[in-house]
């Protein structure tokens, strides 16, 4: 596979469940991102990892917990979510220069019941 | 800090007609500008970007955009659209001297091409 892949593509979970989203990039990039995409709102940057170190955490609730075990993999661990957390969660990767293009995965559509 | 305003949330247009999607930005520093496209059930992909040089930038699939510094705009245009151009389009900016992580997106414009 090439590019940025995300699994699962769809996830339905209850508020008491624990689940994880997985992202993998095959582009040799050194930065990875989690975004939240809600209808009619700009993309919200949640977390950024550069060289496997978390460099940004934009006031995201602690029920979201990222993990970056190496430069190719990124996880988002979810627990005790709320219905308003239902959204499309997008992973992206890039080189860490500001002219560099971010490459996005197809996203995980999360529904919290 | 910077912000991006996409003036139209939805743009319906007939096939083979021209289209313009509007984007204005606000920033206290100079910026780089991007347009991304999101097809149904897919992630975002880069359409084009302005870094420097000619203010008219050509991208993939026949799209182009013009950077207007005095009007702080970066409108996207295509002279003749196809059904396959139906998608959501996002304008984004990042500050010069910053990093790719500082990319700020607009709220998107849904382009629907009608037969």
Image: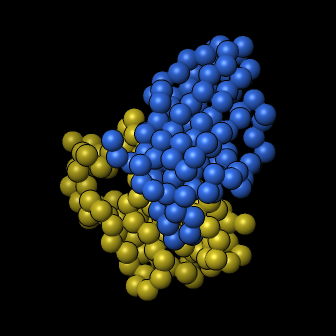
Chain colours: A blue, B yellow
Q: Position of residue B44 (x, y in %)?
A: 44, 49
| Residue at the image position 74 percent from the left and 48 percent from the top | A57
The one nearer the camera, B43 or A51, is: A51
Q: Position of residue B100 (x, y in %)?
A: 58, 63
| Residue at the image position 53 percent from the left and 42 percent from the top | A73
Q: Is residue B80 above or below residue A10?
A: below
Q: Is residue A104 above or below residue B50?
A: above
Instruction: Note whether residue A44 is visible.
Output: no
Based on the displayed image, in which of its 4 quarters is residue A63 positioned? top right
| Residue at the image position 75 percent from the left and 40 percent from the top | A60
The one nearer the camera, A41 or B17, is: A41
* Quarter that holds the N terminus of chain A: top left
Whether residue B37 sits left or right of residue B91 in the image: it is left
Based on the displayed image, in which of its 4 quarters is residue B59 positioned? bottom left
Q: Is residue A74 above or below residue B13?
A: above
Q: Position of residue B35 (x, y in %)?
A: 45, 61
Q: Is residue A109 above or below residue B14?
A: above
The one nearer the camera, A77 or B41, is: A77
Circle count: 0
Q: Residue furthest bottom?
A: B53
Instruction: Note whether residue A84 is visible.
Output: yes
| Residue at the image position 63 percent from the left and 57 percent from the top | A50
* Quarter that holds the C terminus of chain A: top right
Q: Residue furthest front?
A: A70
Q: Position of residue A97 (x, y in %)?
A: 56, 69
């Amino acid at each position: 596979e090439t590019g940025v892949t995300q699994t699962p593509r769809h996830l339905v979970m209850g508020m008491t469940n624990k689940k994880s989203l997985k992202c993998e990039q095959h582009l040799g990039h050194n930065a990875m991102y989690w975004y939240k995409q809600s209808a009619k709102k700009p993309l919200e940057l949640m977390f950024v990892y550069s060289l496997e170190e978390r460099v940004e955490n934009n006031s995201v609730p602690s029920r979201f917990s990222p993990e970056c075990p190496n430069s190719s993999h990124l996880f988002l661990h979810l627990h005790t979510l709320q219905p308003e957390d239902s959204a499309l969660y997008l992973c992206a990767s890039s080189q860490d220069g500001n002219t560099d293009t971010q490459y996005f995965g197809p996203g995980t559509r999360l529904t919290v019941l | 800090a910077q912000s991006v305003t996409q003036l139209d949330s939805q743009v319906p247009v007939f096939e083979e007609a021209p289209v313009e999607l509007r984007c204005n930005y606000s920033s206290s520093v100079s910026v780089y500008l991007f347009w991304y496209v999101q097809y149904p059930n897919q992630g975002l992909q880069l359409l084009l970007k302005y870094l420097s040089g000619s203010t008219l930038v050509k991208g993939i699939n026949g799209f182009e955009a013009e950077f207007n510094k005095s009007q702080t705009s970066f409108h996207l245009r295509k002279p003749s659209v196809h059904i396959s151009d139906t998608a959501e389009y996002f304008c984004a900016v990042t500050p010069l001297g910053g990093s790719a992580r500082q990319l700020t997106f607009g709220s998107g414009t849904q382009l629907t091409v009608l037969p």
